[in-house]
Image (cartoon, helix red, strand yellow):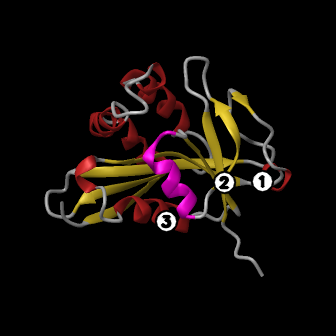
Amino acid sequence: MGDVEFVHYRGPEAARALSEEYADAYTEIYAEPPYDSGPLYSRERFLERTGRQVYRPGFELLAAVDARTQALAGFCFGFCFPEGGWWGGETSEPPADVITVEKVAVIELVLREAYRGCGHGKALLETFLAGRSEPWATLLAHPAAPTHARYERWGWRKVGTVQPAPDAPVVDAMVLNRVPAR
């Protein structure tokens, strides 16, 4: 596939994450192993969860759009966890230096298969984070997913585990320090 362009959506415009096009991309990706269309990854749960998340402080959506066809190649979205905020569900204790400050939670990073292997996923995540001011970023990654090893190569580190819902798998909570060392 060809090049992609990134388009930022903030505020009411970011609710486009609730469209059929985004739900289609989400269910396509989460049908793959290790997710295998588990209950947490259903279209209905995505739309219900995202319907709440778009109203969270700092919610932002970054779309990756095929430069030639204008088709949705992927997307990344997230919002701010305030000081003291962390993932819901059954979680291990987060690190003190992360929990005591604002952080950006990367909720979804989705890239359709035809666009993988070209650096688009990394560019999508980096572009999303570049527009954020929070000193830490956090995301959840399934330990058996190919992206988990990529996150580690990109500087993310595992700090605990989270089971976001009773019918969800246990995944790794990962963080990235966005403040350069002095």
Secondary structure, magenta segment, majority class: helix
Real-space CA distance between mark 2 and mark 3, rounded to the nearest whole angstrom: 14 Å
Q: Residue furthest bottom?
A: 182
Camera-nearest residue between 90 and 70 = 90
Magenta span has 6? no
Q: Which residue is painted at 33% across and 30% down in the image?
A: 31
Q: Which residue is painted at 46% across and 50% down in the image?
A: 147
Name the residue tied to disc 2: 175
Camera-nearest residue between 110 and 153 = 153
Q: Earlier in the sequence, mark 2 or mark 1?
A: 1
Name the residue tied to disc 1: 98
Name the residue tied to disc 3: 126
- In terms of image quadrants, where is residue 137? bottom right
Residue contact between numbered discs 2 and 1, judged by CB atoms under 8 Å: yes
Magenta region: which residues? 144-154
* Above/below status of 52 relative to 67: above
Q: Residue 5 at what x, y percent from top left?
A: 29, 65
The three-letter amino acid code for the residue at tag 3 is Glu
Question: Counting other residues with Cα less than 10 Å from the Cα at mark 1, is it few (<14), some (14-19), or many (20 or more)?
Answer: many
